[in-house]
Amino acid sequence: MSSFRYLTCCLLILASLVKAPLLYAEDFNLRLERLSSLANQGVKGRLLLNNQELGITLENANTLIPIGSYTGIMRYASSKGFAQSANGQLSNTGDFLLEIAGVPGFTDILFHTGTQPHHSRGCILLGPAYRDDKGIGHLPEDHPLRKLRNYFYGSNQPNSSPITKINITII
């Protein structure tokens, strides 16, 4: 048995024993379920990772991406300060910024912070960021984007990137 598969098996057994959330999966399966239209031109949904709910989403009803299955890719830079680093810090560069690739008629479709439909031109909004007194953006520990990063890497302080396929389904 390869050391990778052995380590994965050990993590799965450990997670089941302590009833902790799965920290690593060979596939990273995200599902966005659109739930309802809102009066402010928004569409409310929920985001699930490997069938575990992470949080509520918001999209702009005027720029919804099509229902379908997509591949996620990892980006490390954002001119708008959406890239995440350790401890939920946001800036123009970081180690976690998830893009939905291959969306017909759209480019640069990201999962990022935002609370109003006009904050999105097709992107998936996952709630507010908070700014400290120096203007640096931060995500609280329970923020869906921070949870996504921690699940993806299996740690808040990763020393390597997992080799994993990111599947994104919009329904």
Image (tube, grey):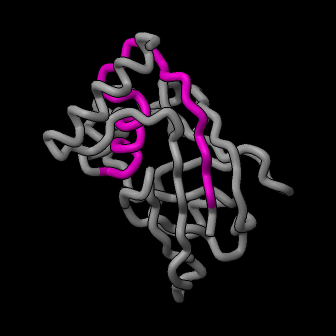
Picture layout, residue 155 above or below residue 44: above
Question: In this orientation, which residue lies closer to the viewer: 98 or 125?
Answer: 98
Identity of the residue drawn at 34% across and 29% down: 154
Quarter of the image for the N terminus: give it: top left
Instruction: Check the image and name the residue furthest to the bottom.
Output: 39
Is residue 166 shown in magenta? yes
The answer to which image quadrant residue 87 occupies is top left
Left/right of residue 132 with respect to residue 8 in the rendered view:
left
Left-right relation of 170 to 93: right
User: Residue 81: image x %, image y %?
Assistant: 51, 37
Q: Residue furthest left?
A: 18
- Residue 116: x and y in percent read 50, 68
Q: Residue furthest right?
A: 105
Coordinates of residue 4 in the picture (x, y in percent): 44, 16
Which image quadrant for residue 43? bottom right
| One can see residue 169 in this view | yes
Q: Number of marks in the image?
A: 0
Residue 91 among those drawn in magenta: no
Q: Is residue 62 above or below residue 139?
A: below
Residue 136 visible, this orientation: no
Q: Nearer the viewer, residue 86 or 131?
A: 86
Is the residue 102 above or below the residue 150 in the image? below
The answer to which image quadrant residue 34 occupies is: bottom right
Give the residue displayed 51% in from the left and 59% down from the top. 125
How far across and how far down the image is residue 97, in percent? Answer: 54, 36
In the displayed structure image, the side of residue 40 where residue 121 appears, left or right: right
Query: In this picture, which residue range is highlighted in magenta?
Result: 143-169
